[in-house]
């Protein structure tokens, strides 16, 4: 009986203490605990596989020009770039305007120099487009760095100071006497062909050519905005893993830089971007 009294006393004491604690008021300056947001999703973890980044966009004319400027500056300063060239392996889609001053009187007899041209025929009824890649296989820019390349065909990108794809707004000064002398070419694409590569991808001195004709018996009409040549492919780089190789005749000469590329498509485009003619596989 005595033990029962002791146990009942302990229970009563515990209940009273609990009532006392729960009834104590919170201090006036004690803030209420902030509400905890409910997260309906489990926290992300880094242990799972990561999604690969999306494919890089194709390099534009402005991208290629900027990269060539950096390569020329490094070459002139004698700097040796470190690490892998991030341009190697990148695709490109570069446009160059052609015929900004209108068609010429005729095409030169020797036009295998990698420059795009447009010219009238003899009776000025049709306009002919022509671009014959130059043979750069033994040039100073390629010699000693051609690896397994059996043939290298070159295409120049004129006016490398213009990042826009259209024709320049500057016109010739009508008061200037004598013929104008253009700036020497300083930026180009070296289309490389491996020894084991397909022979069908090579031009072998053949021009990319297209003829513009008029309606019926009318002569061809030249668009005021001119035409564009679209070059698409991938930068493969030189054996030293650099995209560009530069050379200069002296310290006061502007370096000439070319990128080693694989050319997948060349197209002649109209003023609105429509393909008038195209060639694939080099």
Image (spheres, rainbow, N blue to C red):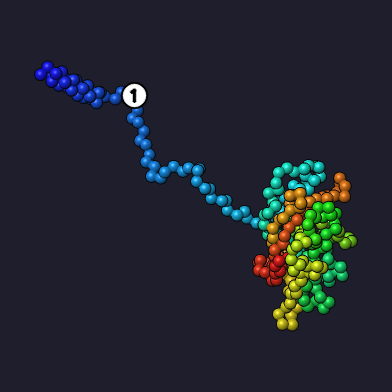
Closer to us: 193 or 55: 193
Where residue 114 appears, as percent x and y from the top left, is 80, 63
As helix, strand or loop, the secondary structure at mark 1 comes to loop
Q: Quadrant of residue 223?
A: bottom right
Q: Is residue 268 left or right of residue 205?
A: left
Where residue 113 appears, as percent x and y from the top left, is 83, 63
* Total marks in image: 1
Closer to us: 77 or 271: 77
Where residue 45 appears, as percent x and y from the top left, is 48, 42
Q: Is residue 69 visible?
A: no
Residue at the extreme left: 1
Residue in view at x 80 percent, y 61 percent: 151
Residue in view at x 76 percent, y 69 percent: 208
Q: Quadrant of residue 202?
A: bottom right
Closer to us: 263 or 181: 263
Q: Is residue 17 visible?
A: yes
Residue 131 position (above or below residue 247): below
**Which residue lies under the disc numbered 1?**
29
Residue in view at x 74 percent, y 82 percent: 217
Quarter placement of the N terminus: top left
Other residues around mark 1 within 10 Å, as few (<14) / some (14–19) / many (≥20): few
Closer to us: 139 or 70: 139
Residue at the extreme right: 178
Q: Quadrant of residue 143?
A: bottom right
Where residue 75 appears, as percent x and y from the top left, is 80, 46
Residue in view at x 74 percent, y 63 percent: 197
Quarter placement of the C terminus: bottom right
């Amino acid at each position: 009986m005595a033990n029962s009294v002791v146990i009942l006393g302990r229970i009563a004491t515990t209940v009273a203490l609990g009532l006392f604690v729960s009834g104590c008021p919170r201090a006036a300056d004690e803030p209420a605990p902030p509400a905890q947001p409910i997260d309906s999703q489990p926290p992300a973890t880094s242990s799972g596989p990561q999604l690969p980044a999306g494919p890089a966009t194709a390099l534009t004319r402005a991208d290629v020009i900027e990269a060539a400027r950096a390569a020329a500056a490094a070459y002139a300063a004698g700097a040796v770039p470190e690490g892998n060239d991030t341009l190697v392996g990148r695709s490109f889609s570069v446009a160059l305007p052609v015929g900004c001053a209108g068609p010429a009187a005729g095409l030169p007899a020797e036009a295998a120099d990698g420059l795009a041209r447009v010219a009238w025929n003899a009776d000025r009824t049709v306009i002919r487009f022509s671009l014959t890649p130059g043979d750069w296989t033994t040039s100073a820019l390629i010699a000693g760095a051609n690896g397994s390349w059996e043939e290298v065909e070159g295409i120049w990108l004129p006016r490398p100071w213009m990042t826009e794809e259209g024709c320049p707004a500057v016109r010739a000064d009508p008061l200037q006497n004598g013929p104008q002398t253009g700036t020497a070419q300083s930026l180009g694409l070296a289309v490389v062909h491996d020894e084991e590569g397909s022979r069908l991808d090579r031009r072998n001195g053949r021009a990319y050519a297209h003829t513009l004709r008029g309606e019926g018996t009318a002569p061809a009409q030249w668009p005021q905005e001119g035409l564009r040549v679209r070059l698409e492919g991938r930068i493969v780089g030189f054996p030293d893993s650099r995209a560009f190789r530069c050379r200069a005749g002296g310290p006061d000469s502007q370096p000439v830089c070319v990128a080693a590329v694989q050319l997948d498509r060349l197209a002649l485009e109209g003023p609105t971007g429509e393909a008038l003619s195209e060639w694939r596989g080099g």
